[in-house]
Image: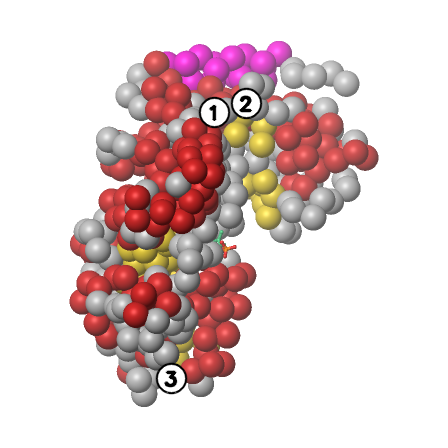
Amino acid sequence: MTGFDAAAAIRAKRLHDRAAELDAADGLAALRDRFLLPEGVVYLDGNSLGALPAAVPDAVEDAVRRQWGTDLIRSWNDNDWWDAPTRIGDTVGRLVGAAKGQVVCGDSTSVQLYNALTGAARLRPGRTLLLTDPDHFPTDQYIADAVARTLGLTVRRVPVRELPGVLAADGPDVAVAAYGPVDYRTGELYDMAALTDAVHAAGAVVLWDLCHAAGAVPVELDAIGADFAVGCGYKYLSGGPGAPAFVYVAARHQDAFDHAITGWHGHAEPFGMHGTYTPAPGISRARIGTPPLLSMLALEAALTAFDGVDMKALRAKSTSLTGFFLDCADTLLDGLGFTVATPRDPERRGSQVSLRHEHAYPMVQALIARGYIGDMRAPDILRFGFNALYVTHADVAGLAAELLRITEEREYADGRFAARSTVT
Ligand SMILES: *Cc1c(COP(=O)(O)O)cnc(C)c1O
């Protein structure tokens, strides 16, 4: 195999130098020390499972040994376990533009979706349509179908581009529109404010799924007048595997929020041990049952990685990283069978870049073997998440150079990269 030809090597060197300049000028560079990243790994899958924040191991150790081991059940009061869902909810709220008292943490995104979507649809009795995105993450689509079956509604799958037209035509029938601001495959970012306005103009309510937006792009739930939102704790929030999700219920809807899963932690008097449900006032009614405290406290520690971080500055670094990767791909990977799936307009992309290639799966495996961890989404997407808290421009330049090497030397064709694991 020939390896890099001389011209490609010069181009790669230039990108490497450019990366060094960009990193030297990066005002957020020190935030990387808030994470424990393994040696020899460039981690570009923080949009799927965020890296380990440095504050987490001690917090988990304390939660297990002291709070659980020593303080035992007294921790519900003495270590404020009881308030954890709303306390941590408020911390997440800062990252998604929600004033205090509108976000609760707990359970999984799927459970929160079911609960919130039911409550959202019940705000518009008599309306029969539930709109969602045919390209939405699978669980969102399955749960839209499940909620519709429970409530006797009809799901209509409408691509984001067609949503304003459908709302204009059939608006009076629409109860709720359930969408995500970032396409999890392509990284396309939609205009949340304009879409929220269009949903409201139809008299419907909107539920935003922020899984790929929270901690990644500035989200202003209160300012845009969003009704409901959910999101997960383990992607850009880096809360750890299976970290609790969160739900946002705008203050103006809380008194009427008639949700699906009426657990005892959402009761007005949880320790009254009543036989029938009376919802708590405020956001507390969105609580369900006993939260996974160890994971909650891990998430709380993880969120300290955002302490003092201005989301606008984080966004500027994120678009710098994604834009630089597009430059690298244009410079190094042209003519090698890649196409860019992510919008080039920085206003229209989240914090990831996706490339399409017919050999996407073995290419990602070959990259991982070289220490560059991204992921693959069927059928042909190589997906790279750029968490601006810890990814550098040097990482990005290195990624492009490795992709060039793997492609030119046909390293991906090696049989050991063909076998599919359960998780891609
Ligand atoms: C990651 C993701 C989920 C995951 O749901 P879980 O219940 O946490 O497994 C749901 N929706 C979207 C849009 C996602 O990106």
Q: What residue would you read off at disc 2?
A: 38
**Depth check: 98 or 281 in front?**
281
Query: Judging from the image, what secondary structure is the residue with disc 2 in?
Result: loop
Q: Identify the residue under disc 3.
A: 128
Lower position in the chain sequence, tag 1 or tag 3: 1
Q: Position of residue 187 (x, y in %)?
A: 45, 46
Residue 27, compared with residue 253, is above or below; it is above
Task: Quickly name the residue at label 1.
Answer: 36
Front tag of 1 and 3: 1
Q: CA distance from mark 3 to mark 2?
A: 51 Å
Distance (Cα) linking label 1 and label 3? 49 Å
Evaluate whether residue 404 shows in this view.
Answer: no
The residue shown at (35%, 24%) is 31
Do the numbered discs 2 and 1 sit on residues whose CB atoms are within 8 Å?
yes
Q: Residue 83 at what x, y percent from top left? A: 29, 51
Which region shows up in magenta? 6-21
Which amino acid lies under the numbered mark 2 shown in the image of this protein? Pro
Query: The residue tagged with tag 1: helix, strand or loop?
Result: loop
